[in-house]
Amino acid sequence: MRLGCLVGLTLATGLALAACGDSNTPEVAKEEAIKIAVAGPLTGKDAAFGAQLKNGAVQGVEDINAAGGILGKKLELSIEDDNADPKQGVSIANKMAGEGVKFVIGHFNSGVSIPSSDVYNENGMLMVSPASTNPTFTDRGLWNVFRVCGRDDQQGTVAGQYIAHNLADQKVAIVHDKTTYGKGLADETKKALNEAGIQEVLYEGINSGEKDFSALIAKMKEAGAQLVYFGGVHTEAGLIARQMRDQGLNATLMSGDGIATDEFASIAGPAAEGTLMTFAPDPRKREEAAGALKKFEEKGITPEAYTLYSYAVAQIFKQAAEAAKSTEPKKVADQMRSGQTFNTVIGDIAFNDKGDVNRLDYTMYTWKKVDGDRISYVEN
Amino acid sequence: MDYFVQQLLNGLTLGSVYGLIAIGYTMVYGIIGMINFAHGDVFMVSVFIGLILFLLITSLFGGLAIALALIIVLVAAMALTALWSWTIERVAYRPLRGSFRLAPLISAIGMSIFLVNFVQLVQGPRNKSIPPIIDGSFTLPMIDGNVTVAYKQLLIMGTTVVLLTAFWFIVQKTSLGRAQRACEQDRKMAALLGINVDRTISLTFVMGAALAAVAGVLYLVQYGVVSFADGFVPGVKAFTAAVLGGIGSLPGAVIGGLLIGLIEVLWSAYFSIDYKDVAAFSILAITLIFMPSGILGKPDVEKV
């Protein structure tokens, strides 16, 4: 009896909440607004990057609305969480399509961006990823797919050539996290290394989400690895660095844009020092970024890594829509492919036919101590 | 040889943590025949409790010796995690005890979802980390090379052995343990003979959670990072360990944990790391074909 009562109560609360949810969406008032969304891993292990995407998009949309919106219409931003999971990505993509979202800033993980882009394609939505670097993403030639970051074949080449020029005498182990992004990047680097005549001593895949890499590290130690190239994100990279130190493996870790968050240093601890990383030249140092940086500062947000990229996507939507004199995604996409140069916080950008940016955008960073004991990434 | 010993050491460390969590599954299954799916997440909660306590203690009494701080954290985390588990049992499982067999199982899955989301809400979705607590290692010279033994690996194995002995003693030699074993054999008869069955079951949950908390604090010392989703993988591995060792059997859980840890690590050492989980689960499947109730399990057709 008591149980039945409890169940009834729970159901009633649930219904009441659902009702609240419905009444909170004033559909009439916002009909004129352009619906735009930012989608990324707000929860889960890549949440640090989801926050970057979200912060950039929120600020970008806020600034556009403050300046009068696009073609006189305000932007209405929704924030969607894909949990770094391809299935979840497709599911929120469908949800956004149902809600009438036209423009999407996202996603973060290449493995999520690629399947979601098909849903956007079918529903006539335009997507620009601030951070998905896997070549396949734009190589499929979908009309609605763009990115403002570089590609992993560029990133891998930069990493491979750096090793060939500066660390040619070291034994290299290549490790990836079996994701579209991680394995893709590791393979591109491997290709560049092999072309330069360097053969890796070890090539392994690990499970993303695991914590114990002691077996891998003992294996690398046995193989005599002096440089570990890791394709993946900061959670595993941080743990690998930390456990290498524990086991006394004195090798340098090198990775890509997937570790570009200060969370890497907090996971790795003192072991983060000396890690090498390929990433775009720091957009925070650009003159164009100064205005936006001040606004982030006022809010107490550190605009690290992809934050400004996400901000730039909003700027590109505005400039392309105004040049095309339309907010139709297809027309905006055509305008973006026309070769127009967009002035953004990450510099002047133009897109090629694939939807990639027309510039080679990678340089080498080193993680080292900045102001006292804090470890962060510094351009070489 | 040195490589093998090194990997053996890594496997035993990992297996110790699995074993400690596995005991929670096996004890609860033994006494009420239910698989407590929320146990992996109770473990995750304990890591968070350990993390918060550790940061609190080190910031309040900065000069405290690490060893003392760790002991305080360990004891407090055991107590608080036990409280969580006791509450979960009281709220989610006890009211369903007279119900059909699947009811508490579903309730456990619900509890697991609740814990994950609760921690995500109050602690945020990002990884939380602490600086390395115990750094350093020593080298063990072998015939053909050196083996690096990290102090924390020793700490993990040492703590596991001590606590397992203590809990084994409780179950085998004390009146509480006798009550537990009586409830396991026949709950109704035990009640007729004056054993407070509800209290015994509660204490079983408390003991399982306390050991999960030990695993949690050791996990924190070893890896230093935790996020709200971290209960799942160790939970599944420990559950596998409990099944492999024979669910319901205390030494079985430990043997299962060590085996799973060793298989994972040794497979990674000599074959492709990609397939280590395939290896672990294949061995589980093969074992269950020939020993359906696990390595040390008692055949019990009635309960399954």
Image (cartoon, grey):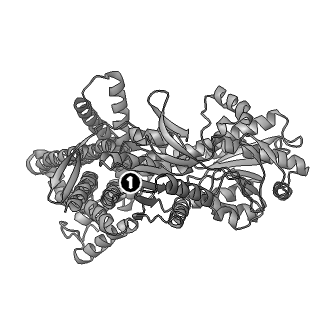
Question: Seen in the image, is A264 located left or right of residue B265?
Answer: right
Q: Secondary structure at mark 1?
A: loop
In this view, the residue in front, B149 or A80, is B149
Q: Residue furthest right?
A: A325
In this view, the residue in front, A182 or B185, is A182
- Which amino acid is tagged 1? Gln
Image quadrant where residue A152 sits = bottom right
Residue at left offset 23%, top offset 77%: B290
Q: Is residue A285 above or below residue A222?
A: above
Q: Is residue A141 above or below residue A88?
A: below
Residue A363 place in picture, x, y as percent: 60, 48
Question: Seen in the image, is B179 located left or right of residue A68?
Answer: left
Q: Is residue A228 above or below residue B44?
A: below
Asked if residue A9 shows in the view, the reply is: yes
Residue A209 place in picture, x, y as percent: 44, 54
Q: Residue furthest bottom?
A: B290
Chain for numbered disc 1: A
Question: Seen in the image, is B75 located left or right of residue B122?
Answer: left
Residue A106 place in picture, x, y as percent: 67, 51
In this view, the residue in front, B267 or B187, is B267
Question: Seen in the image, is A345 located left or right of residue B11?
Answer: right
Residue A228 place in picture, x, y as percent: 42, 55
Asked if residue B242 shows in the view, the reply is: no
Point out the image quarter for the C terminus of chain A: top right
Please rate how many residues cluster around mark 1, counting C-alpha atoms within 10 Å: few if below 14, some from 14 to 19, many from 20: many
Q: How many marks?
A: 1
Q: Which residue is mark 1?
A: A226
In this view, the residue in front, A226 or A20, is A226
Residue at left offset 70%, top offset 45%: A78
